[in-house]
Amino acid sequence: MQLYNSFGPNPRAMRMFLAEKGITIPMKDIDLMKAENRRPPYTDRNPGGQLPALELDNGKCIGETVVIWEYLEEKHPTPPLIGSTAEDRAETRQWVRRVEQNITENLYNGFRFAEGLQLFKDRVPCEPDAAPGLKRIVQARLKWLDGLMNGREYIVPNRFSIADIVLYCALDFGAGVGQKIDPALSNINAWFKRIDSRPSAAASLHPASAQLKMKG
């Protein structure tokens, strides 16, 4: 297997997952800043153009972060970051979907359509007028999640999961591009500090993060 790696919050989430699992996979860096992921030969393997991607020994390529995690958890079930039972897995998938649809996708598009517009305008469809609204949605849904997090340590109650990885990497990136967590959200801020203290959080940062002054 080979993992196509780069700077960015989703590749960082991939590295954090691997660190939590104790899995080592050979990596090949793709230059996201130079858009190597948006042209051949990379798009011959992963036509979606996103990063990370996992190329299997048989040549097949998996190009969706959470799907890669699903595959790897089936191969390496311990420690479980999705779940060890059908019920646990369903609960985790539910929360990942809520986090992605309500918060992280809006956060990333809010960045792409505003601060990141010059980088992304020739790569993906961009709607600059939508950026302020998307950012407001992020803050509103974080407030919603803050209320639900009262009295629990992790997004999925009672256990660390990929839902925590997805949201943590997005919010750490967002803080550097004008989308900080509202200090009034005490539960989310306490949760963030809790995840930030895990060894995998620091270990997953790409070497380019310091130069680019963004967490990815």
Image: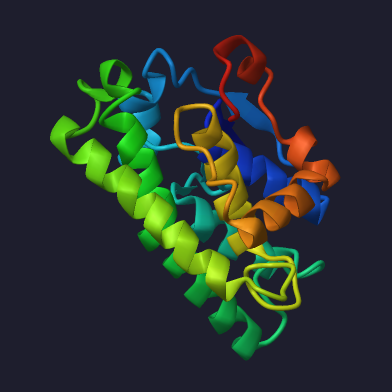
Is there any visible trace of residue 1 in the rendered image?
Answer: no
Image position of 24 (left or right of 137)? right
Quadrant of residue 112 in the image?
A: top left
Q: Position of residue 70 (x, y in %)?
A: 58, 65
Q: Position of residue 38 (x, y in %)?
A: 32, 26
Q: Residue at x 41, y 51 (%)?
A: 139
Q: Residue at x 56, y 53 (%)?
A: 166
Q: Residue at x 78, y 34 (%)?
A: 202
Image position of 108 (left or right of 52)? left
> Residue at the front extreme?
184
Quadrant of residue 205 in the image?
A: top right
Q: Quadrant of the C terminus?
A: top right
Q: Nearer the viewer, residue 147 or 44?
A: 147
Q: Nearer the viewer, residue 200 or 111?
A: 111
Q: Position of residue 169 (x, y in %)?
A: 59, 43
Residue 30, compared with residue 11, is above or below; it is above
Residue 150, compared with residue 109, is above or below; it is below
Is there any visible trace of residue 211 in the rendered image?
Answer: yes
